[in-house]
Image (cartoon, grey):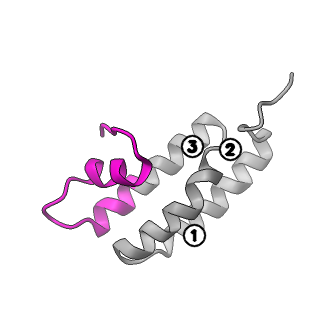
Amino acid sequence: MQLSPSNLPPERSAELLDLLLSELAVQEGSEGLLAWTKVSLPLKNTLLEADARALEAAYVKKLEETALPDIDPAEQLGRVTGRTVSI
């Protein structure tokens, strides 16, 4: 089986997921979260689908914790990723 360039082998994907989750956990404020996202989004795109979804869920939770009260977290995520997001 040939892996596409965007998919890591399972063990590497799990390692990267753990690293990204630990980095995400220490981000504070919307600016720190945005900076992390800009760096981490290309890395997230190399994860296996299940790992990428787990990271997205953790990101949404973190975003909700740091969200401005008048902006929907899905809208904030959409601004960062450039796509429509439904939560």
Is 7 situated above or below 65?
A: above
**What residue is shown with label 1?**
23
Question: What secondary structure is found at the residue carrying circle 1?
Answer: helix
Horizontal placement of 66 versus 42: left or right?
left
| Residue sticking out furthest to the right | 1
Q: Amino acid at mark 2?
A: Thr
Question: With respect to residue 46, does 66 lie above or below?
Answer: below
Asked if the residue under mark 3 is in contact with the one under mark 2, i.e. CB atoms within 8 Å, the reply is: no
Callout 3 crowding tier (Cα within 10 Å): few <14, some 14–19, many ≥20 = some
What's the residue at 65%, 58% (across, down)? 18
Relative to 62, is 72 above or below? above
Q: Residue 64 has which mark?
A: none
State the image coordinates of residue 29 (x, y, percent, origin top left): 35, 76
Q: Position of residue 30 (x, y in %)?
A: 35, 71
Looking at numbered disc 1 in the image, what kind of residue is underneath it?
A: Glu
Residue at the disc numbered 3: 52
Marks 1 and 2 sit apart, C-alpha to C-alpha, by 17 Å
Q: Secondary structure at mark 2?
A: loop
In the image, what residue occupies the spot 76% across and 40% down?
A: 10
Which residue is painted at 29% across and 47% down in the image? 74
Q: Amino acid at mark 3?
A: Ala
Which of discs 1 and 2 lies nearer the camera? The answer is: 2
User: In the rendered image, which residue does mark 2 sit on?
Assistant: 46
Q: In which image quadrant can residue 83 be found?
A: top left
Q: Which residues are magenta?
A: 60-87
As measured in the structure, the alpha-carbon distance from the residue carrying label 3 to the one carrying label 1 is: 15 Å
12 with respect to 77 (left or right): right
Residue 36 among those drawn in magenta: no
Q: Nearer the viewer, mark 2 or mark 3?
A: 2
Q: Is residue 63 magenta?
A: yes
Toward the top, the furthest residue is 1
Q: Nearer the viewer, residue 83 or 47?
A: 83
